[in-house]
Amino acid sequence: MSEITIDSNPTQDELDALRIFNYPIWSKGVSEFQWTFNELEVCYFLEGEAIVTPKDREPVRINRGDLVTFPQGLSCSCKIVKDVKKHFRFG
């Protein structure tokens, strides 16, 4: 299984090329839950902070401004530390 990839400093050109601001927005308050990514997800964090812990791996911290790719098949626990708002797309 692939790793979570994080670009903490994407350029505006990179974001525009992905058409990231045309993706739907997902918001979630402070919480904890289990999740499995049935498809690849690409997202861009507009607000908030989360800690994602894949099974048998080290936790990954995600913050505002991060461009993140979650691989298909990833099972993890998600802890929303600060309310999250992100653009996202599957597939």
Image (cartoon, rainbow, N blue to C red):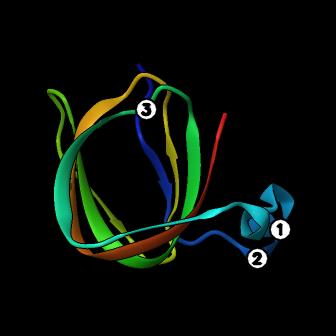
First-in-chain label (2 vs 3): 2
Q: Is residue 87 left or right of residue 28?
A: right
27, 87: nearer the viewer: 27
Q: Are marks 2 and 1 in contact (CB under 8 Å)?
A: yes
Q: Amino acid type of disc 2?
A: Gln
- Count of marks, rendered view: 3
Does 75 sit above or below residue 50? above
For the point 44% across and 26% down, the residue is 2
Does 28 sit above or below residue 12? above
For the point 17% across and 41% down, the residue is 58
Q: Residues within 10 Å of mark 1 (few under 14, many from 20)?
A: few
Q: Which residue is mark 3?
A: 37
Choose top left, top right, bottom left or bottom right for residue 23: bottom right
Q: Which residue is mark 1?
A: 16
Q: Position of residue 59 (x, y in %)?
A: 19, 48
Q: Marks 2 and 3, how far apart in space? A: 27 Å
Q: Position of residue 31 (x, y in %)?
A: 18, 63
Q: Is residue 72 left or right of residue 83?
A: right
For the point 73% across and 63% down, the residue is 20
Q: Amino acid type of disc 1?
A: Asp
40, 6: nearer the viewer: 40
Q: Which residue is mark 2?
A: 12
Task: Look at the image and tell me in which quarter the C terminus lies.
Answer: top right
Q: Residues within 10 Å of mark 3 (few under 14, many from 20)?
A: some
Q: Marks 2 and 1, how far apart in space? A: 6 Å
Does 51 sit above or below residue 64? above
